[in-house]
Image (cartoon, rainbow, N blue to C red):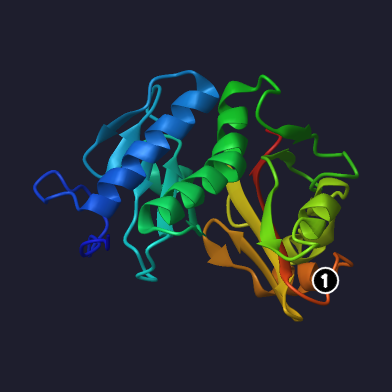
Amino acid sequence: MGWGPWRKKDGPVANEPIEPKESLALRLVAERLGGLGGAAWEVAGDRVRGPRRVAVVLGHDHEGSEGHVDLTFVLDTDRPEQTSLPDCVSGFGPTPEAKLERAVQMWATTTGAAVLEMLGQRGRHGAHFPARDPDGFPGRHAIQGGIVGWGAGPEHSSVQRWAADRALLPLIAPALTADGLPRQEPIGVKLFFGTFHGKDTAEVRVNGRTSEAASAALLTADWPRPPSGGSYARTYAVLVHPS
């Protein structure tokens, strides 16, 4: 089965038909977040509505990939410009549906878990690092979600295992704080890195935008480089101003 055309623009789609990929992505997001947080998450148009004024909005597919999805956590739908945490993720699998399901699973385990932990403050979904914690991010309370990994070959999980035993935020903090952080509102930071057949990849995105300096800093870290096959890891953190 192939997917139909992806929605061409952002914004509400109340008057537009929902394509099969969109419909499945939204349903999977609602199911995953409901399973994590216990609150009711319901599909409404181009978004999934959660408690209070929280929502996850589906974005346009800028890659055109069967397993790629753009998702923005909006912490307050009355103030989307100030409270949006955009992210994107790609999944893999034998079918388009499997790829999308894996993508949403990885997003929920990393990004979803970090945001739900920030909202709930129960210590169930993420790790908390106060502003002065050496394993965290200077000047910000950091909440890090889970670490997911994937790859191929006998060392397919080596990067994920390495990441689980390391404080990752201090590796990129100097690069991100050099020019100042973009706002006082919560900031979302995605880390994605790994190796495939000798080719290294390291990407750090801040509120959806690539930070070249932080990505370069992550690339220099001593995570495992399997000589054959591949290994990748992904995680997500929310940085909250102490005030």
> In the picture provided, is 145 more to the left or to the right than 77?
right
Can I make out residue 177 in this image?
yes
- Residue 23 point in image, percent of width and height: 26, 45
- Identity, as a three-letter code, of the amino acid under mark 1: Pro
Q: Residue at x 62, y 29 (%)?
A: 117
Q: Residue at x 40, y 22 (%)?
A: 51
Pick the residue in front: 233 or 138: 233
Quadrant for residue 80, please give it: top left
Residue carrying label 1: 226
Residue 225 vertical position relative to residue 38 in the rendered view, above or below: below
The C terminus, quarter of image: top right
Q: Residue furthest left?
A: 15
Q: Secondary structure at mark 1?
A: loop
Residue 37 vertical position relative to residue 100 in the rendered view, above or below: above
- Residue 75 point in image, percent of width and height: 45, 36
Q: Residue at x 21, y 47 (%)?
A: 12
> In the picture provided, is 154 more to the left or to the right than 192?
right
Can I make out residue 185 in this image?
no
Quadrant for residue 43, please give it: top left
- Residue 54 point in image, percent of width and height: 41, 31
Callout 1: few (<14), some (14-19), or many (20+) C-alpha neighbours within 10 Å? many
Q: Residue at x 62, y 55 (%)?
A: 190
> In the picture provided, is 75 more to the left or to the right than 9?
right
